[in-house]
Amino acid sequence: MQNILVVQSSVLGDASASRGLIDDFLTTLGTRANVTTRDVGSNPLPHLSGATLGGFSGADGPEATAERALSDELIAELQAADVLVIGAPMYNFGITSNLKSWFDRVLRAGVTFHYTAEGPVGHLSGKRVIVVETRGGFYSEGDGKALDAQEPHIRAMLNFIGITDITFVRAERLAISPEARTESLAAAADELKKLGAEGFALAA
């Protein structure tokens, strides 16, 4: 049985489209996986600070020690996961600041990646990721694509720590009309259902 880490980042609680899609996906999997959830939308992490970076560099003091311990905890959850599922709504063309705070603590030099003369090397290769993106407009192609600071950012951060097996499931046009919202959510739910049925998260 494989381990799934779910990172939820919407601030909308039960009204969140990304949260609803992921909940349905997990229902599809049933009891075939061990699921750990880190909800940074409902329980935000502190934003990056001097104490955070001090903790990463080994500084003493209660704030730095607490920041290092929090980063260690988040990284341990990620290291233990075979599959990472990220709920990533688009806010003002990018990811939520809460999700950025999570990435700020798991992208850690010497732990999840290291630098070499040839460039950075990630330490978390072999993991699979499903990113559920929800967007009010349409950004996956056409004129809107130039405004998309969400998907390229997520891909770059995951690649940086060695994760390249990434599936993006997009629910777009959610704010265009009720009909567009219903159609897009149904299509995304169907895509996630197929991933579950095909054993995406459970394959060896």
Image (tube, rainbow, N blue to C red):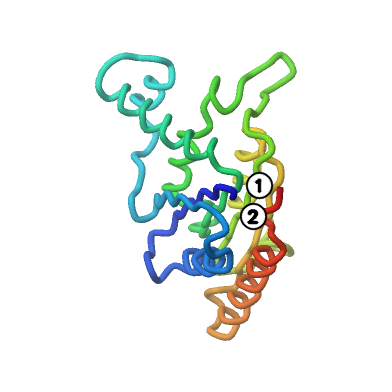
Q: Answer few, some or many: residues within 10 Å of disc 1's Cα (few below 14, many 20 plus, some between 14 and 19).
A: some
Residue 66, given in percent of the width and then of the height, sits at 30, 27
Q: Which residue lies most toward the left here? A: 62
> Given this view, does label 1 or label 2 mark the residue nearer the observer?
2
Q: Residue sitting at 69 percent across and 60 percent down?
A: 199
| Above or below, comparing residue 154 to residue 197 in the picture | above
- Say which residue label 1 marks: 128
- Amino acid at circle 2: Ala
Task: Determine which of the numbered discs, if any, sits on residue 10 in the image.
Answer: none
37 horizontally vs 90: left or right: left
Percent across and percent down for residue 57 are: 43, 16
Residue at (60%, 48%) from the top-left corner? 83
Residue 141 placement: quadrant:
bottom right
Residue drawn at x 70%, y 21% is 119
Q: Is residue 80 left or right of residue 40?
A: right
Residue corresponding to mark 2: 201
Task: Name above or below for residue 59 compared with residue 25.
Answer: above
Identify which amino acid the numbered label 1 is placed on.
Answer: Arg
Quadrant of residue 187 within the rendered picture: bottom right
Residue sitting at x 63%, y 49%: 129
What is the spatial separation of the Cα atoms under label 1 and label 2, in whole angstroms?
Answer: 8 Å
How packed mark 2 is, by other alpha carbons closer than 10 Å (few <14, some 14-19, many 20 or more), is: many
Q: Is residue 12 left or right of residue 94?
A: left
Image spot of residue 183 (x, y percent): 62, 81
